Amino acid sequence: SATGYSYEECTATADWLLKRAPERPLVGIVCGSGLGGLAKMLKDELVINYCDIPNFPQSTVHGHAGKLVFGTLKGKPCVCMQGRFHLYEGYAIQKTTMPIRVFKLMGVETVILTNAAGGLNQDFKVGDIMIIKDHINIPGFAGHNPLVGANDDRFGVRFPCMSDAYDRDLQQLVRAVADELDFSVFMRDGVYSVLGGPSFETIAECRALRQLGADAVGMSTVHEVIVARHCDMRVLALSLITNKAVMDYQSEKKANHEEVLETGALRAKQMEKLVSTVVSRIPNTPTHC
Ligand SMILES: Nc1nc2ncn(CCNC(CO)CO)c2c(=O)[nH]1
């Protein structure tokens, strides 16, 4: 099938990359809008442009570089997506998540997903980093789910559980590292809700999402989490709160992408420090003998 995301096509892409990668990566990192600097943390980096990778989609969003970076973080082999794919770019949902399956096929055991998000929780401030403890998959309510269609058992089961999607030990680890780095003042925990985009949400939608229990809103990440859990990778996900979502009709505030990128730049250093320290502390699961 020329979908670009069948098991065979993902395997072909993984094999193509492993031939070029310095070593098999254990941790996969996905950089959200304006957070591409995370890739610069990697030592002995090898950069491959998405346009040269077979079956890979192309990044179309400002602030998403479109490069796959291999390297090490404190000795741990990693692979980092500088630029991720979104429903609103018009790709098939399975296409937007195929890099996650390629990570799995390359040997990645843990994925760290970062994104920029709007703060629905009024206690949140611009620049806060929210540890995602759960998600609300709005497109999924309407059947827009990356696992729709024939299930390939080589990836995972037909009906995967999502109540344990966000690894509790990794959340604990992030909190401990944030305390050590004295970042606690801007660390939060919360529920991330995803919309399809590209239009930002209305005031009524923000209020409805808040009523549903969401603390932040974005246009990515959830589909990657579902695919990562389907193939049994551990997931840690962090949202950089880049603006406060507009919740009242008197407000003059207008959400915009430039503001998203600016906040990313402001908090990038701390996000890099946090993620790199966490990666260095992630225990490698004993290799299955
Ligand atoms: N209110 C609000 N603020 C946000 N900041 C980042 N994002 C995530 C979406 N990011 C898009 C547009 O910047 C680019 O992927 C959002 C969002 O969806 N809503």
Image (cartoon, helix red, strand yellow):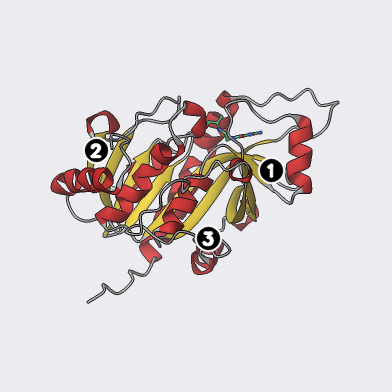
- Mark earlier in primary sequence (2, 3): 2
Number of numbered discs overlaid on the protein picture: 3
Q: Which residue is mark 2?
A: 47
Cβ at disc 1 under 8 Å from ligand 1: no
Tell which of 255 and 197 is nearer to you.
Answer: 197
Q: Nearer the viewer, mark 1 or mark 3?
A: 3
Q: Position of residue 69 (x, y in %)?
A: 28, 42
Q: Nearer the viewer, mark 2 or mark 3?
A: 3
Q: Amino acid at mark 1?
A: Lys
Q: Amino acid at mark 3?
A: Ala
Q: Residue furthest left?
A: 19
Q: Which residue is mark 1?
A: 125
Q: CA distance from mark 2 to mark 3?
A: 30 Å
- In which quadrant is the C terminus drawn? bottom left
Q: CA distance from mark 1 to mark 3?
A: 26 Å
Q: Position of residue 156 (x, y in %)?
A: 39, 60
- Mark earlier in primary sequence (1, 3): 1
Classify mark 1: helix, strand or loop.
Answer: loop
Q: Quadrant of ligand 1?
A: top right
Is residue 122 in view from this perspective?
Answer: no
Classify mark 3: helix, strand or loop.
Answer: loop
Describe residue 254's horizontal placement relative to residue 220 as left or right: right
Tell which of 151 and 177 is nearer to you.
Answer: 151
Classify mark 2: helix, strand or loop.
Answer: strand
Q: Position of residue 33 (x, y in %)?
A: 49, 34
Image vertical order of residue 3 relative to residue 274, above or below: above
Q: Which residue is mark 3?
A: 165
Q: Residue shown at 26%/74% (left/top)? A: 288
Is residue 31 in view from this perspective?
Answer: yes
Q: Residue furthest bottom?
A: 289
Tag 1–tag 3 contact (CB < 8 Å): no
